[in-house]
Amino acid sequence: MEHRLNPQTAAPWVDRWESRQKLYATAREERFDVVVDVVSHTVRHEARPLVADLGCGPGSLAVRLATALPHARVVAVDHDPLLLALGDACHGTGLAFVDARIGTGPWQERLTADGPLDAVVSATALHYLEPEALSSVYERVHDLLRPGGVLVNADHLFQDDAPVRELAAAVGRGHERRSKEPAADEDWNGWWAAARACREFGELLAERRRRALDPGSDNGLSAQQHMELMRKAGFRAVGTVWQYGHSCVLAAVRS
């Protein structure tokens, strides 16, 4: 990577990122466990499986996969130079971080050098893509996977019916009340405000501004609409393997 950070600088920021994310993902650790279980089952007969994490951030999900599957090759893909640098500093010895903008240009070419993928995962990232771009990403992923390979999308996805959306929101609030984990000290805006004030990140933040990577808006697609796009992309076996409130894990298996 062009701009590197030392692990001592990066580690506290990654810890703060992990803590902050709990504000936005109901039962986040359980959701990660589900993704790992799905991938582990899919690659159980592979001696050297290849797994890609799209929109990896600093590697939260990717490092969990690499830890659970030490024989796997895990490729973590993102286009945010700061998050990539943080992840590479903390987890670079066990992961391969790739700088590519998902859904734009030939992003998938960086993933095919070692052959077809066994699994593609994503966590709390694909809801930022516009529907047309997301449809294209699902099509490309379908083509990158080997037969029997799996696409796993873990995200906060709403339901089509308003009364069910309301019930799912109530479930999420109930989980927060019952959770024994301490609340995060800062939210999304607070973390980024602090990062922008950090001198060590100067060059990375300048590159981030050049790439115009301010957070996008949610594409508004429901879980059902995501699954429809997966089927349109060519996946025949598509469904929800886990859900807690709005927090979902969708899986699509290539035939």
Image (tube, rainbow, N blue to C red):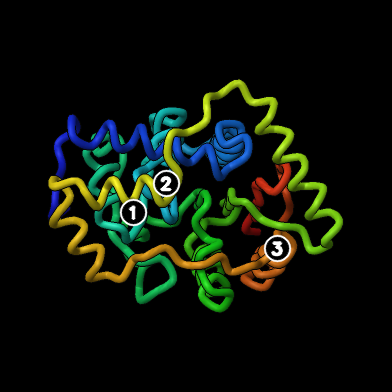
Disc 3 marks a residue whose amino acid type is Ser
Could you tell me if residue 160 is visible in this image?
yes
* Residue where numbered disc 1 is placed: 114
Label 2 secondary element: strand
Image point (46%, 53%), residue name: 117
Could you tell me if residue 48 is visible in this image?
no
Q: Which circle marks residue 50 in the picture?
A: 2
Neighbour tally class for label 1: few under 14, some 14-19, many 20 plus, Cα within 10 Å: few
Q: In the picture provided, is 208 more to the left or to the right than 37?
A: left
* Residue where numbered disc 3 is placed: 222
Q: Earlier in the sequence, mark 3 or mark 1?
A: 1
Disc 1 marks a residue whose amino acid type is Asp
Quadrant of the rendered image containing residue 111: bottom left
Of tags 3 and 1, the one toward the viewer is 3
**Contact? badges 2 and 1 (CB < 8 Å):** yes
**Contact? badges 2 and 3 (CB < 8 Å):** no
Image point (54%, 70%), residue name: 134
Disc 2 marks a residue whose amino acid type is Leu
Label 1 secondary element: loop
Residue 181 x/y as whole percent: 55, 24
Q: Earlier in the sequence, mark 2 or mark 1?
A: 2
> Separation of disc 3 and disc 1 at Cα?
34 Å
Above-or-below relation of 141 to 88: below
Q: In the picture provided, is 189 more to the left or to the right than 36?
A: left
Q: Earlier in the sequence, mark 2 or mark 3?
A: 2
Above-or-below relation of 95 to 230: above
